[in-house]
Image: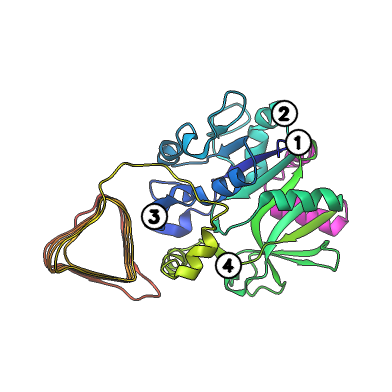
Amino acid sequence: MKSIMGILYTGERDEQLRELTVSRAVAAVPLAARYRLIDFPLSCMVASGIRNVGVIAQRNYNSLMDHLGSGREWDLHGKRSGLVMLPPFLTKESAGVYSGFLDALHSNLHYLRRSKERYVVCTDTHMLYSARYDDMVAAHEASGADITLMYSRDPQARRNGFGRYLQVDGENRVTDLEIDPTIPRLPCTYVESFCIRRELLIHLVDQAISRSQYHFFRDLLIAAIRENTLDIRGFEIPGRVWPLDSVQAYFNCSMDLLNSDTRKALFPEDRPVLTKLRDEMPTKYVSGCQVKNSLIADGCIVEGTVENSILFRGVRVEKGAVVKNSIIMQDGYVHKDAELLHCILDKQTTVQEGQTIIGPRSYPVVVAKNQIV
């Protein structure tokens, strides 16, 4: 698959995750005890044979760059290709903040022009799923389409007031699109991933920016469908799709991952999800602790009760503490006799002795990183 390059866009949809994205990009949000959101599409690209991947950052990208490093964990640290970080920069033409995906691509046309691959797979990082990008490219090439959009028919991926939706005919030709409808009418959810020829993408980006068009879906795709100027096809992926566009969506997704069948679908054996390594001791379960239906990473110490919860690396739950239906990120500390229910604790958060934090499942309590409660 040397004819495919990948582009990951990490620039939008961060304000809806509130405290979780105050100091990090959406792509760097932790998930499933030891991963970040960007690990999933990046691992899908690697499993599809893509070896030239550009990551377009927008803001709050320090933790993202620290996580990705040189790309070694994904085997993307070669001499002639590999992982390329594309942070924003200030020029006469650019204010350093992208107005949309097309604007981001335009600011990085030098990267597209110097790449040699025939096709480009572009994807956002706030949609969680497992897919084969090489299958999408093969379908794209076979159909002769100009652009192929990846979509899902998973009804749980639909959101009132949010999302991009499309309709396809019997030949998978996209016939209609809608963006952020109050109630979605079209049957297919666009998962923010598409395939296109590299030369055509360069031409479309340059043409769009010259007309002050900055958004790929809103400005380019909808106009192309309305004016019938591009052959746009769809490519359906099976299985679950989670749009992580709110704290509630993030919490529900995390709770779904406590189900073993859901984890098997998201972590297929033939496409492992790779992430940055951190050497830790195995988790220590002290005599008398109780742990039920939970994901617990290495380096934790559990003395109390943990049920239906996710503990990231280095978390400690002292004796008498009760953690239920909650998420505690890296190096969190829950002192004795504290109680947590429906909570999300960001990194290095401390809950003091005897404290009780209880929130409704539909609106979990979020504690920002480095806080003492």
| Mark 4 residue element | loop
Residue at 34 percent of width and 71 percent of height = 293
Cα–Cα span, label 2 and label 3: 35 Å
Q: Which one is nearer the viewer's eye here, 133 or 59?
A: 133
Residue at 59 percent of width and 66 percent of height = 162
| Mark 3 residue element | helix
Callout 3 touching callout 1 (CB < 8 Å) = no
Amino acid type for the residue under numbered disc 1: Ile
Q: Which residues are magenta?
A: 203-230
Position above or below: 62 against 154: above
Callout in the foreground (4, 3): 4
| Residue identified by numbered label 4 | 240
On screen, residue 161 versus residue 295, left or right, reads: right
On screen, residue 37 versus residue 236, left or right, reads: left
| Residue identified by numbered label 3 | 20
Q: Position of residue 344 (x, y in %)?
A: 33, 62
Residue at 75 percent of width and 37 percent of height = 198
Callout 2 touching callout 1 (CB < 8 Å) = yes
Position above or below: 61 against 143: above
| Mark 1 residue element | helix
| Residue identified by numbered label 1 | 202
Amino acid type for the residue under numbered disc 4: Arg
Callout 1 touching callout 4 (CB < 8 Å) = no
On screen, residue 239 versus residue 244, left or right, reads: right
Q: Which mark is residue 113?
A: 2
Q: Position of residue 165 (x, y in %)?
A: 69, 65
Quick one: label 4, few (<14), some, or many (20+) residues within 10 Å? some
